[in-house]
Image (cartoon, rainbow, N blue to C red):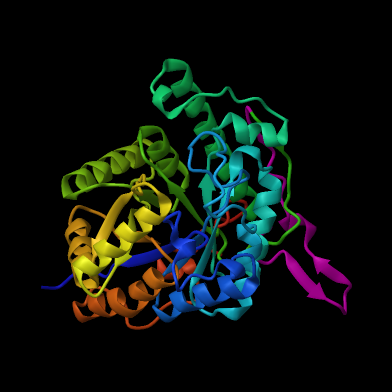
Amino acid sequence: MAFAPLHLAVALEGAGWHPAAWREPAALPDELLTGRYWTELIQEAERGLIDYVTIEDAHALQSSLPDRPDERIDQVRGRLDAVLIAARVAPLTRHIGLVSTASVTHTEPFHLSKAIASLDYAAKGRAGVRVKVAWSAYEAALFGRRPIPAFSIEEHDLPLVRELIQVLFEEAADVVEVLRRLWDSWEDDAEIRDASTGRFIDRDKLHYIDFEGRWFHVKGPSITPRPPQGQPVVTVLAHDTVPYRLAARAADVVYVTPTDWPTAQAIVAQVRAQQEIARRGHETLHVFGDLVVFLGRTAKEAQQRKQRLDEAAGEEYTSDAHIFTGTAAQLADLLLEWQAAGLSGFRLRPGAIPDDLAAITGALVPELQRRGAFRREYDAETLRGLLGLPRPVNRYAPTGAAS
């Protein structure tokens, strides 16, 4: 049976997504805050021909509680900045995309635009960003610039809370709009660099973006010339209608969290409906399924390893995403089944690193290749190219010609 090629991303989080992963024999807890650790992980993902990695980040410390810090001392706390990790790794990799997570609720879009543009230069066209909304009162208090009322997950459906979430995601959409305008604020040929005439730039090809919104006004232009990709890839994690709307309006890739084939099909339908409402039905918007994965040579081995991690943590691990335990062949079966529901790719969260990352690259990828469902070599120079996304026309170019 022939399959359409899958896209695969890997989500990197510290020692792995299971909170006890740092205690595994193969883990490297002493290395978590080193450049070498992240370089070796991403180089391993590149050996597996993975489209891209996402690097987790947040302003607040990791916590077992969704809305506030905890007092635990038995789990990893502390992290490096995701954009700086990606910038460190960029010159040491050649093909794999580097997507940094950014909490946009408390980050100025001007600063984020130049950070991701600079990363795209460092990676020669392989940068992206995962736009993240920060909704907790605790995280807002770290900055002290804007109050966010405290609420629990159980209060998510209260009208005032739903209104707050709506506002935060509308703000995130404005952030992405500013990012995209700033990335376009230099035309591709704005830099002349002609020493004989003394002209370094053509000032007429730098543009004010003059964005005026509810939360900020940004005049522009950027201080960084247009990135190599024109527009670095924008991605969003979404669990419900409001974030689906953000993804449909602003993203190139949306990560969703189905639990089975019917929910995958239903979620894809919701995202596509929002894409039509946003008048982007003609554009490519990838829908990736998120899964936490624990892989073993046998299903029993994978299950026992997760059970051992649960026992070390003192509780069963749960996640917003589907948790898979089994063999690489069984995971390949699931991915190809869910692909038929309309998913174009998957973002895999390794339960424990390096074990599950090595199983993805060393067992899952070859299994998919044998089935004709995954590439055997990189076939594009940029992340947009790997994802089949065209390099966008610059909105400020006077003729509208392709850049």
Q: Is residue 64 visible?
A: yes
Q: Which residues are magenta?
A: 185-214
* Whole-percent x, y for residue 227 in the image: 62, 63
Q: Residue at x 65, y 30 (%)?
A: 215
Q: Residue at x 48, y 17 (%)?
A: 160
Residue 263 figure quarter: top left
Q: Residue at x 17, y 65 (%)?
A: 333
Which residue is most to the left?
A: 1
Q: Foreground: 344 or 54?
A: 54
Q: Quadrant of the C terminus?
A: bottom right
Is 187 above or below relative to 192? Answer: above
* Whole-percent x, y for residue 107 in the image: 66, 43
Q: Quadrant of the N terminus?
A: bottom left
Answer whether residue 52 is magenta in the image. no
Left or right of residue 325, residue 129 in this image: right
* Whole-percent x, y for residue 371 in the image: 18, 77
Q: Foreground: 372 or 211?
A: 372
Q: Main secondary structure of the magenta part?
A: loop
